[in-house]
Image (spheres, grey):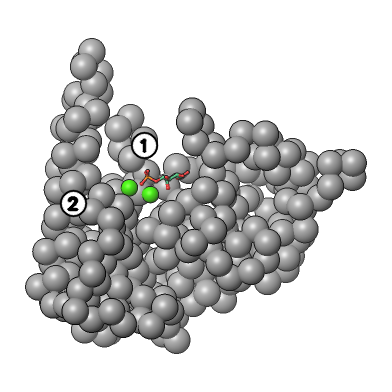
Amino acid sequence: MARSALLNVMVQAAMKAGRSLSRDFGEVQNLQVSMKGPGDYVSQADRKAEEIVFSELSKARPGYSFLMEERGAVEGDDAQHRWIVDPLDGTTNFLHGIPMFSVSIALERQGQIVAGVIYNPALDELYTAERGGGAFMNDRRLRVAARAKLSDCVIGCGVPHLGRGHHGNFLIELRNVMGEVSGIRRMGSAALDLAYVAAGRMDGFWENNLSAWDVAAGILLIREAGGFVSDLSGGQDMLDSGSIVAGNEVIHRALLKTLKKPVSAR
Ligand code: IPD
Ligand code: CA
Ligand code: CA
């Protein structure tokens, strides 16, 4: 599969950061059984991965702006282009030695996501998409799953935790969805969750309180794999609202409806 020069730049940055995370992940697996735990070490691994992505992308495309989880917004001379980067998505998994984490890089051009790369270094799975060019895992073209009934579907979600999100609202959403589907998963990396929907491994996904860097690349992957993505109100404000619902056309619509079922209808 021939990749564009732009996608090559993104893939190189994601894989280089991924290799650094892989090396640190090996050490985390040793540290995590110690009393002190690997907390500080993980923050360092995260910052190191971000530094790699930042330096690779700045070298290849000088002047582009950035939105990165650790650094925040970095204004470049070129305000038309913005990289949206999560150098380590799935930090809690990483910290606990669970090999389900990723590097996520998206490129926005004039407010539109035009390219996305998500890399899981532990499984060496590389997801790429460019607007109009389809979505791929390694060299394989991706399509969202074709299931049309929620009762056949495995749906991913994010679960709020200590100090994060609205626990009561989530329980209502979960109760609505779990009564209608064949399985629910909580993988712990929103970027990979979206990549899994693009790959047809999960039929749908929803989560609230996310950040732009968690979802930007995944949104494009799903669209390019023929899927549908919206915020929880059915609009297209995913990056700013932090809420997201995804699936094929039918499952996306059904999920939106189910999530919003009034309490009395349950
Ligand atoms: C988190 C992961 C997780 C999601 C959280 C995110 P981080 O990102 O994507 O799956 O449920 O809301 O904050 O902190 O690991 O980069
Ligand atoms: Ca994240
Ligand atoms: Ca992160």
Residue 96 drawn above or below residue 80: above
Q: Looking at the image, which residue is at 9% across and 73% down?
A: 59
Instruction: Decide if residue 50 is on the left or right side of residue 175.
Output: left
**Are discs 2 and 1 less than 8 Å apart at CB?**
no
Q: Which is more toward the observer, 29 or 76?
A: 76
Query: Element at badge 1?
Result: helix
Residue 98 drawn above or below residue 33: below
Look at the image and tell me in which quarter the N terminus lies: bottom left
Residue 39 percent across, percent down from the top left: 24, 28
Residue at numbered disc 1: 93
Residue 153 percent across, percent down from the top left: 68, 53
Sequence-wise, which precedes: disc 2 or disc 1?
2
Q: Which is more toward the observer, 155 or 110?
A: 110
Look at the image and tell me in which quarter the C terminus lies: top right
Q: Is mark 2 within 8 Å of ligand 3?
A: no
Query: Element at badge 2?
Result: helix
Q: Looking at the image, which residue is at 60% across and 53% down?
A: 206
Cα distance between the residues tagged 2 and 1: 16 Å
Q: Looking at the image, which residue is at 46% across and 72% down?
A: 220
Q: Which mark is residue 49?
A: 2
Q: Is mark 1 within 8 Å of ligand 1?
A: yes
Q: Amino acid at mark 2?
A: Ala
Q: Which is more toward the observer, 243 or 228?
A: 243
Residue 180 drawn above or below residue 232: above
Query: Disc 2 or disc 1, which is closer to the eye?
Result: 2
Residue 27 drawn above or below residue 230: above
